[in-house]
Image (spheres, rainbow, N blue to C red):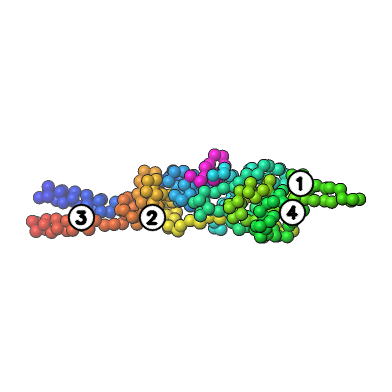
Amino acid sequence: MKKLFFFFFSFLYTITTLTFPPLATSATTSCRTLCGNIPINYPFGIDGGCGSPQFKGMFNCSTDLFFTTPSGSYKVQSIDYEKKTMVIFDPAMSTCSILQPHHDFKLADIQNALIRPSYDTVFALFNCSNDSPVHNRYRNLCFNAAGHSCDELYSSCTSFRIFNTTSPSGNSTIHTTPYCCFTSYDTVRVMSMNILDCSHYTTVIDNGKMRGVAPLDWSYGIELSYSAPEIGCDRCRKSGGTCGFDAETEIFLCQCSGSNNNPTRECGGGITNQGGCNSTKINYTTILWAIMFMSFIYTVL
């Protein structure tokens, strides 16, 4: 009889353990949450399997955070997760203090769909030829940039004054400046700088404070606006997990520990997709066998 009781309690302990596994405990994940002074949150990630798979490979972290595109790497100056915007700086573009050869700012197709320059980003093309498309057929692509003019740009910035020229006309001289164009990202996306026939460009963020401000005090940079699917990351983060994805399947993964990362929506006993360490799925077959066994014991006794 003692052996029978021992067997019964051993069996009961086993099915209880299998049916109701222990809750997952919090542990440090492999996803870094800071690069330099820039916080790294969903949908971005700088480590494998972190963030959203759509942004995989777009960021790298040395001492600072860089955003990588087909045209180069750009230092990230700030990220606003509430507004879903990110500001980057193009080290190869011209500014008021330095004049640099033109190049094209390019994004990959998926980047154009997910994270592209916002409408507050103004591309200023200058020293454009008389044959430039934006000086002729596509002149309508240029717009008024908070009341600023080409002459102001050429006269205010030390690096741009080289384009100020004078020529004699009778008893007087004529002051001339080459054509410039304030336009949006869509223009430089469709037409390269060679096609636009403008020798230099710069980018400015018009956040509503550009009017009346001299070019020296403009906010130079590129503001990107991004979108990300809502997959319940807040739920994962509030439970102590880190939002990521499976490296093979790229399905959402709430990382609860470094060694036990089943496809789950939250940590600490939350619901999972496939059972696993945090599953609340109950093995009813096991429970049925336990009830039948207990009935048998009761009959025998």
Label disc, if present, on residue 286 of the rendered structure: 3
Read off the residue under disc 1.
163
The residue under the point 15% across, 48% down is 6
- Disc 3 residue type (three-letter): Thr
Whether residue 290 can be seen here: yes
Q: Residues within 10 Å of mark 1 (few under 14, many from 20)?
A: some
- Disc 4 residue type (three-letter): Cys
**Dot 3 and dot 2 residues touching (CB under 8 Å):** no
Of tags 1 and 2, which is closer to the observer? 1
Of tags 4 and 2, which is closer to the observer? 4
Identify the secondary structure beneath mark 4.
helix
**Dot 1 and dot 2 residues touching (CB under 8 Å):** no
Inter-mark Cα distance, 1 to 2: 59 Å
Of tags 3 and 2, which is closer to the observer? 2
- Which of the marked residues, 3 or 2, is nearer the chain's N terminus? 2
Inter-mark Cα distance, 3 to 4: 79 Å
**Whole-percent x, y for residue 47 in the image:** 46, 43
Read off the residue under disc 2.
265
Residue 219 appears left or right of 236: right
Inter-mark Cα distance, 1 to 4: 11 Å
- In magenta, the rendered stretch is 57-69
Of tags 3 and 4, which is closer to the observer? 4
- Which of the marked residues, 1 or 4, is nearer the chain's N terminus? 4
Residue 102 appears left or right of 23: right
- Disc 1 residue type (three-letter): Phe
The residue under the point 52% across, 48% down is 108
Label disc, if present, on residue 187 of the rendered structure: none
Read off the residue under disc 4.
150
- Which of the marked residues, 3 or 1, is nearer the chain's N terminus? 1
Residue furthest left in the image: 300
Q: Residues within 10 Å of mark 4 (few under 14, many from 20)?
A: some
Inter-mark Cα distance, 3 to 1: 83 Å
